[in-house]
Image (cartoon, rainbow, N blue to C red):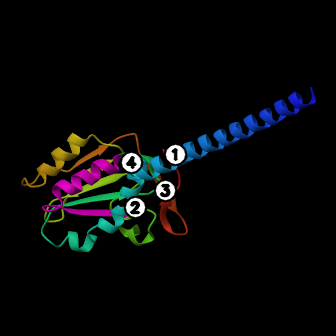
Amino acid sequence: MFLVSDKLIVQSESQEQILKLNIKTILILIISIVIVSFLLFKNFFFKSTYLLKSFGELSVDPEVAFTNNKPTFMEFYAEWCEVCKEMAPQVSAFKDEYEKDINFVFLNVDNQKWGNYIQKYAVSGIPQVNLFDKKGNLVSTFIGKQDEMKIRESIHNLEKEKKPYEEIINSEISTIQEDKNYGVSPRSHG
């Protein structure tokens, strides 16, 4: 009877070790799948944030934009702005489609170097898109989340002669307020 009991104990311990090994293997497999999936799809998950961060690098200098005899698309944005993130793929598509004919200027409202433009164009909510004709005249201002077709229509109208100024405001914006110490800075997100 003693041998049977020892055999059962050894067999039970062996099964426990196999079970622990199987659980470890399954956990390692699951973790590996999650890590590989994240690496493969990271651009998909973070595309809007990446686009916003790249806008500053892709921007034409505003001084150049207003002197090179091309219409200008100027966007005021911030990397923390959720509405800006939502619109980033649409704005990027506009840039890809029109960049040969139109200057694309991206000004981050968190960068103090653009404070004079923020004040000049009365930026109080972002994203704000200003469209200028080739002579540098302000033609349209879009504040907040906008319909793609409305912006596209305004871009096409940039080539037409003298169109009256148009301002379009959507309630989906992020607000910025004046900071007494540094000019203009982000204060809240709407």
**Label 2 to label 3, Cα distance in Å?**
22 Å
Q: Earlier in the sequence, mark 4 or mark 2?
A: 4
Q: Position of residue 50 (x, y in %)?
A: 40, 57
According to the picture, the residue beneath numbered tag 1 turns out to be 34
Q: Is residue 182 visible?
A: yes
Left or right: 61 as drawn, with respect to 31 = left
Question: Three-letter amino acid code at disc 4?
Answer: Phe
**Label 3 to label 1, Cα distance in Å?**
41 Å
**Label 4 to label 1, Cα distance in Å?**
15 Å
Question: Three-letter amino acid code at disc 2?
Answer: Lys
According to the picture, the residue beneath numbered tag 4 turns out to be 44
Circle 4 or circle 3, nearest the eye: 4
Q: Which residues are magenta?
A: 87-107
In the depicted view, which residue is nearer to us: 13 or 187? 13
In the depicted structure, whether residue 123 falls above or below residue 146:
below
Q: Secondary structure at mark 3?
A: strand
**Quarter the N terminus occupies:** top right
- Say if the magenta span includes residue 105: yes
According to the picture, the residue beneath numbered tag 2 turns out to be 53
Q: Earlier in the sequence, mark 4 or mark 1?
A: 1
Circle 3 or circle 1, nearest the eye: 1
